[in-house]
Image (tube, helix red, strand yellow):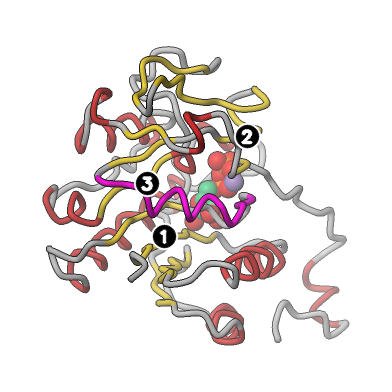
Amino acid sequence: SIRKIYMITPTKTRAEQIADLTRLAQTLYLIPNLFWIIVEDESQRTGRLHRLLQSFNLPFIHLNIATPDYLKPTKNQSTWRRPRGMHQKNIALQWVRENTSTNEDALVYFADDDNTYHWKLFQEIRKIQLVGVWPVGLVGELLYERPICLNGKVYSWFHYIYRKRKFPTDMAGFAIHLGLVHKHSNYLFNVSANSVGEQESNILGTMTSMNQLECLANNASKIYVWHTKTQSMFLTTTEKLRNAGMKYDL
Ligand code: UDP
Ligand code: MN
């Protein structure tokens, strides 16, 4: 039988959220045996998001935790100075540990709500024994970042920004076996502001090593995921839209 993928998606409240999640959900219709763990960045789960998630008829769990205000990206500050979706990923890791068995043969993938995923990515994820890596498009100020591979092994990386990263890949560029989440039962992402850019290296450095990495996507010659970003729209005021009956709701 086909191995389960636990896909962890943090999601921030914003005007484009419902549109982004709708697009992502409809990608997931192409993927069998995937369990979607959605962690809303709110102190309470909203009915608005819950009803949207129910409307998809996908297997999911809706969790929540609010990023503390002092760590939230502010309007006039470049977002890369703040960790994004890290509290949410940590809650999801805890949920996975408490709700799956330690010997289940399944995979864990961190999938932001605004990226673009080809269905073939999930086929690649199911080839993983421990940790798999692959290229990510439109990231790191490049058309793509990627591992440089030979015979399925990684021996270098093509990257540009943050050159001192030990594993210079994006969150979208790797997945891990569920067993590693259980094995490293205390591992959580560092949520502090100075950990930006180091999160991927930190989890990979803890759970694996360069020579263990499995290079996927045809020796990293294919791009199956893109770090796309939805432009935030100029809205005249959300209050006016609400009055016009344009709630972000189903
Ligand atoms: N996110 C979140 N809370 C935040 C900022 C981001 O939950 O305060 C989520 C967001 O919805 C996305 C992920 O974390 O799923 C990464 O954020 P974003 O896409 O803004 O980051 P970038 O694309 O700039 O790396
Ligand atoms: Mn993003």
Q: Are marks 2 and 1 in contact (CB under 8 Å)?
A: no
Residue identifier under label 1 = 8
Write down the residue under mark 3.
Answer: 175
- Residue 139: give x, y in percent of width and height: 60, 31
- Ligand 1 near label 1 (Cβ, under 8 Å)? no
Pointer 2 or 1: first along the chain: 1
Q: Residues within 10 Å of mark 1 (few under 14, many from 20)?
A: many
Q: Nearer the viewer, residue 14 or 38?
A: 38
The secondary element bearing badge 2 is classed as: strand
Q: CA distance from mark 3 to mark 2?
A: 16 Å
For the point 47% across and 60% down, the residue is 9
CA gap between label 2 and label 1 equals 20 Å
Q: Earlier in the sequence, mark 3 or mark 2?
A: 2
Badge 3 amino acid: Ala
Of residues 170 and 150, the one drawn nearer to the viewer in this rendering: 150
Q: Write the start and end of the magenta stretch as one range.
A: 116-129
- Indicate the amino acid at tag 1: Ile
Badge 3 marks a residue whose secondary structure is strand
- Around disc 2, counting alpha carbons within 10 Å, would you say few (fewer than 14), some (14 to 19), or many (20 or more)? many
Residue at x 67%, y 62% (from the top left corner):
20
